[in-house]
Amino acid sequence: MAPAAPRTGEAIFASVERVNAELFTLTYGAIVRQLLTDLEEVEEVNKQLDQMGYNIGIRLIDEFLAKSNVSRCVDFKETAEVIAKVGFKMFLGVTASVTNWDAEGTCCSIVLEDNPLVDFVELPDTCQGLYYCNILSGVVRGALEMVSMKTEVTWIRDMLRGDDAYELQVKLLKQVPEEYPYKDDE
Amino acid sequence: MIGVGKIKQYANVLDKPLSKGKQEVSLSAFAFLFSELVQYNQTQVDNIAELERRLEDAGYAVGARVLELLCHRDKGNRRETRLLGILSFVHSTVWKVLFGKVADSLEKGTEHEDEYMISEKELLVNKFISIPKDMGTFNCGAFVAGIVRGVLDSAGFPAVVTAHFVPMEGQQRPRTTILIKFAEEVLRREASTYNRIVKR
């Protein structure tokens, strides 16, 4: 089958209502700071951010499917491309690229070309273990779970921790077969 | 080159050139994030007043930074020092940057000399929020009240700032009014001889 035409979220992003990224960035910063004060342990903050992202992801997928007109992806490779090119663009206005595929085609990296969460941010010495953008990994995990894909999403590179890019590894654990929520005879 | 982001690395966040503030994200992305902020804080409190206080705290942190950012970027490292100046800065400049529009109105309280109100027919943060009946007068605008307080306080105008729903005739949804009550010292300073002589 011929590869699907390259899809981007450009047009969708242009058509949806938008807000200033700085409001978004600073609000996210306020959330992270609140979590750090409340939970004290950086590990706990990472967990909570991931949970928040997951909560967002399971709701965000509906809006994504409704507005993006994306049809069913044939394989995980296409899914990853759609997340990077359409998903990130549509919600955050940034694009990402997919790279580092493993041989089985079940694990890849999404590399962010821009990241609106981290403007003005610097990690103090006390927060070195913090995955500041952990909410994003939760979003991807939550959204994919709603389309029957169990994944594990981890940060491989994080510029706030001194790396040269933001790289999110997405590993497909299993495809959950779709089931009707009811049985015919019930 | 694939695999390498376009973002340039800086040793220090201060070396990074300040963005022009033209970047945008989708409103839904913000709404999702804000809803998580509210939901998380709901798990941390026992009552509405506490919830509002926590949202206000979160907003305060945003406000303090917004003031710094805007004074540096838009005002050549100057900030307003007079009461009306700072109020119109909040109502116009801050609102425009954060919410994409100037606030609907800025009024002086009729009953008290120290009260001012900024009103918005549909506050951005309340756009997708409906308050359950059992939460009474709770208003997520507390976050915005916090932003306003953060800006004012950091500029040397301490005030108590609260958000209220005000029903509007003929409108289904109430508008939100941000009530600003300045500290006594602010008004005293405003009325001082120095401020009367140095008219700008």
Image (cartoon, coloured by chain):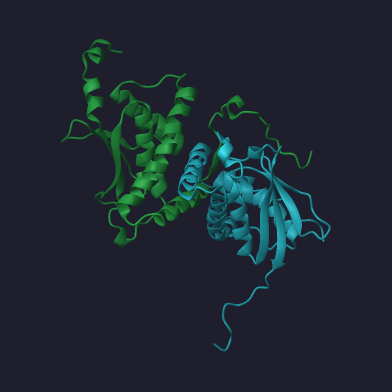
Chain colours: A cyan, B green
Q: A43 or B192: nearer the eye? A: A43
Q: B43 or B29: nearer the eye? A: B43
**Residue A47 horizontal/vertical position (percent):** 56, 54
**Residue A52 horizontal/vertical position (percent):** 53, 54
* Quadrant in which the N terminus of chain B is drawn: top right
* Quadrant in which the C terminus of chain B is drawn: top left
The answer to whether residue A54 is left or right of residue B3 is: left
The answer to whether residue B160 is left or right of residue B54 is: left
- Residue furthest to the right: A103
Q: Quick check: can you spot residue A101?
A: yes
- Residue furthest to the top: B197
Q: A144 or B56: nearer the eye? A: B56
Q: Quick check: can you spot residue B100?
A: no
**Residue A172 horizontal/vertical position (percent):** 72, 61
Asked if A64 appears above or below A178 in the picture, the reply is above
- Residue furthest to the left: B111
Q: Quadrant of residue A184?
A: bottom right
Q: Residue at x 81, y 55 (%)?
A: A102
The answer to whether residue B22 is left or right of residue B158 is: right
